[in-house]
Image: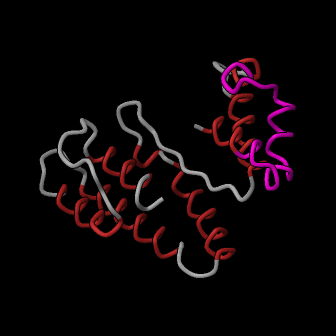
């Protein structure tokens, strides 16, 4: 989250043409974002909000796993409101799932709710039926290496 996704998303927001910095780490993300404030056409308030959200996510991820996951799930609700950084037809979302089944149900929901997708598109994209996908993401996934790999392949 702090080494790949947030840096990629946040730099994409402030530097949408992709020029310049390509590698970001948690340790230098705030500093890197801060450096963008001096550039033309940069929304300084947006950069400050991104820095604050990143710092908050890092802080929330500390401590015991259960509290961190619950806190980060709440954080993602704020993150996913998304209107604050949608730009040029680009948006970002971030979700945390505690089980493979939660992730599968979320994916299915997105396909079912999106008018341009639908269940047929889901099944074409993942190569198995909705019912098989739910079964694949069930408790057996924790004991079956093949199922774990198959699920991971679908997510990629």
The answer to whether residue 10 is above or below residue 70 is: above
Q: Is residue 95 left or right of residue 4?
A: right
Q: State the quadrant of the C terminus.
A: top right
Q: Is residue 19 left or right of residue 83?
A: left
Q: Who is closer to the viewer here, 39 or 63?
A: 63
Q: Residue at x 29, y 57 (%)?
A: 47
Q: Position of residue 151 (x, y in %)?
A: 70, 41
Q: Which secondary structure is most common in the magenta stretch? A: helix
The answer to whether residue 66 is above or below residue 124 is: below
Q: Position of residue 59 (x, y in %)?
A: 48, 76
Q: Who is closer to the viewer here, 30 or 25?
A: 25
Q: Position of residue 74 (x, y in %)?
A: 62, 64
Task: Identify the image's colour scheme: rainbow, by chain, secondary structure or one colour.
Answer: secondary structure
Instruction: Using the rendered view, name the quadrant where residue 7 is placed.
Output: bottom left
Q: Who is closer to the viewer here, 27 or 16?
A: 27
**Magenta stretch contains residue 125:** yes
The answer to whether residue 75 is above or below residue 129 is: below
Q: Residue at x 33, y 45 (%)?
A: 13
Task: Please report the bounds of the magenta region as a residue range.
Answer: 123-148
Q: Is residue 120 left or right of residue 67?
A: right
Q: Position of residue 40 (x, y in %)?
A: 12, 47
Numbered-mark total: 0
Q: Residue at x 19, y 40 (%)?
A: 19
Q: Residue at x 28, y 52 (%)?
A: 23
Q: Name the residue furthest bottom.
A: 63
């Amino acid at each position: 989250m702090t080494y790949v996704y947030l840096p990629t998303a946040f730099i994409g927001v402030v530097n949408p043409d992709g020029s310049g910095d390509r590698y970001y780490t948690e340790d230098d993300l705030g500093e890197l974002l801060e450096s963008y404030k001096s550039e033309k056409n940069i929304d300084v308030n947006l950069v400050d909000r991104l820095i604050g959200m990143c710092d908050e996510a890092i802080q929330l991820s500390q401590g015991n796993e259960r509290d961190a996951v619950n806190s980060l799930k709440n954080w993602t609700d704020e993150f996913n409101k998304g209107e604050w950084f949608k730009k040029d037809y680009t948006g970002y979302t971030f979700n945390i799932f505690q089980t493979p089944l939660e992730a599968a149900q979320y994916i299915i929901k997105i396909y079912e709710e999106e008018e341009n997708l639908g269940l047929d598109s889901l099944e074409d994209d993942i190569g198995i039926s909705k019912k098989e996908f739910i079964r694949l993401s069930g408790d057996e996934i924790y004991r079956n290496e093949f199922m774990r790999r198959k699920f991971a392949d679908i997510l990629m």
